[in-house]
Amino acid sequence: MLFKARSAAVYGIDANMIDVEVDFSGVKLTEDRFHTVGLPDAAVRESRDRVRAAIKNSGFDIPPTQITINLAPADLKKEGSGFDLPIAIGILGAYGSLQLRDLSNFLLIGELGLDGSLRPVQGMLPVAVAARAAGIQNLLIPAANAREAAVVEGVQVYAVNTLLEVRELLNAAANGGIHAQPVHVAPRDLLGEMQHFPLDFRDVRGQHTAKRALEVSAAGGHNILMIGPPGSGKTMLAKRLPGILAPLAFEEALETTKIHSVAGVLDADKGLVLQRPFRAPHHTVSDAGLIGGGVIPRPGEVSLAHNGVLFLDELPEFPRNVLEVMRQPLEDGHVTIARASMSLSFPARFMLAAAMNPCPCGYFNDKSRECLCTPPMIQRYVSKVSGPLLDRIDIHIEVPAVQYKELRGGAAAEGSAEIRARVLAARERQADRFAKASERIYSNSQMGTRQIRMYCELSTDAERLLERAMQQQGLSARAHDRILKVARTIADLEGEAHLAVKHIAEAIQYRTLDRTYWA
């Protein structure tokens, strides 16, 4: 007898519908013979042992026969343990243990334990989105994944713990309706909850110029590079950056959650990423770990930092090839990973925050310590960060050593709450400006050439200042556009509609350090 169940497989950050077809021969054998077809990977092929034990330990007596399981469409590679549940239900349905014969309105996914219990799987949010797009109203999934899937409106999510619960729920649907209550989550209310940030800018003494640069960076989503001696507070400043960022919009939160769900790093208790990500990989990370990779590609650190911050401490210590692969995501906002069997794209629109010493010993240009490095040593050190990569960083700021009086001073520094208030006001002005844009633009850093020409008009004096800076410093066309974007953010922080000379001057100032160290 043939029986069909519906499931899904995740590719990239999207899911495809998979039909699980189960057929048995009816001829009794001495032992079961499972044949799984449809390009299954090792985890799917091993499901026959888990499914056989789960069915037996759940109290079902299935005589040994030859069972054929087809995962359609057959030309897509299937991976993971999420097909355990639909395969088990398909076997029970084929043997007549289910009263409901049509499961076209149910999607089943989950890993089975040997005792028939259900365990969570990765990528449940993309599965729920795909189910809604396919018109499937009911999702039967492990309880640990329920809140994640319930974020998607328009589908009924039922949290189940065992194979027996799934069978009882399907039999109830055949006898007049499901009496269990679906899981309910109000995702927009979750985003409105008070966000707590344990690290505060009030703890940072001195470094007023660096704080100002980080405020501009947060207000416009601009990339920033901090250069300074060891112990000057570069890492301390960067770790407090999430506390002044604007909250996630609902669409941003959904897209970020899909990436974290696929990567298996989502907090199951929340079901939705509520704060902008802050990723800080170690400098020993590989290019695949940073960008993503695998036989079936998985997202890397640049995608996990999507809509958030990617912090690279000790930037020159990263391998040169690892840094160079960031060029495409920094420019395009996404990364494409090509394999022989498929090519997948992952979103990677993040804010890069990087920190580095000016030389191997760390004390070049430091007034209090003598630098022991020779000019060739310094040049080799800073040249690990290439010019094209540096050109994609909007703000370059020097973070000098903090003086003793500033460290021991009694005056309290400005806190993150005050800075965040100004950042939020600037982001609101940007949201109003881009409300009618054909593409989704959330910050000034995402403006294209058309938006720059439209919203960054210059006066005659500002035009002359920018032209002189371009000629004297030898800035590229990319640097020209990034200066205008930063200037637009500075004007937004001051609540001014038009760019003035002072806005252009400050934006140019943030592009001068690369001429000091990389000249």
Image (tube, grey):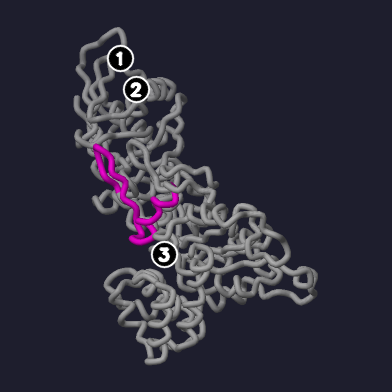
* 298 up-or-down from 202: above or below: above
Ranked by sequence position, the earlier of labels 1 and 3 is 1
Quadrant in which the N terminus appears: top left
Residue occupying the point 35% across, 18% down: 61
Q: Quadrant of residue 421?
A: bottom right
Q: What is the x, y in percent for residue 202?
A: 69, 70
Q: CA distance from mark 1 to mark 3?
A: 63 Å
Read off the residue under disc 1: 32
Graded by Cα atoms within 10 Å as few (under 14), some (14 to 19) or many (20 or more), the crowding at tag 1 reads: some
Does residue 177 appear left or right of residue 250 in this picture? Answer: left
Labels 3 & 2 near each other (Cβ < 8 A): no
Read off the magenta span: 322-344
Residue occupying the point 51% across, 52% down: 380
Q: Nearer the viewer, mark 1 or mark 2?
A: 2
Residue occupying the point 61% across, 74% down: 209
Read off the residue under disc 3: 391
Q: What is the x, y in percent for residue 118?
A: 44, 34
Read off the residue under disc 2: 48
Graded by Cα atoms within 10 Å as few (under 14), some (14 to 19) or many (20 or more), the crowding at tag 2 reads: many
Q: Nearer the viewer, mark 1 or mark 3?
A: 3
Ranked by sequence position, the earlier of labels 3 and 2 is 2
Q: What is the x, y in percent for residue 65?
A: 26, 15
Between 458 and 160, the one nearer to me in the picture: 458
Residue occupying the point 36% across, 31% down: 84
Ranked by sequence position, the earlier of labels 1 and 2 is 1
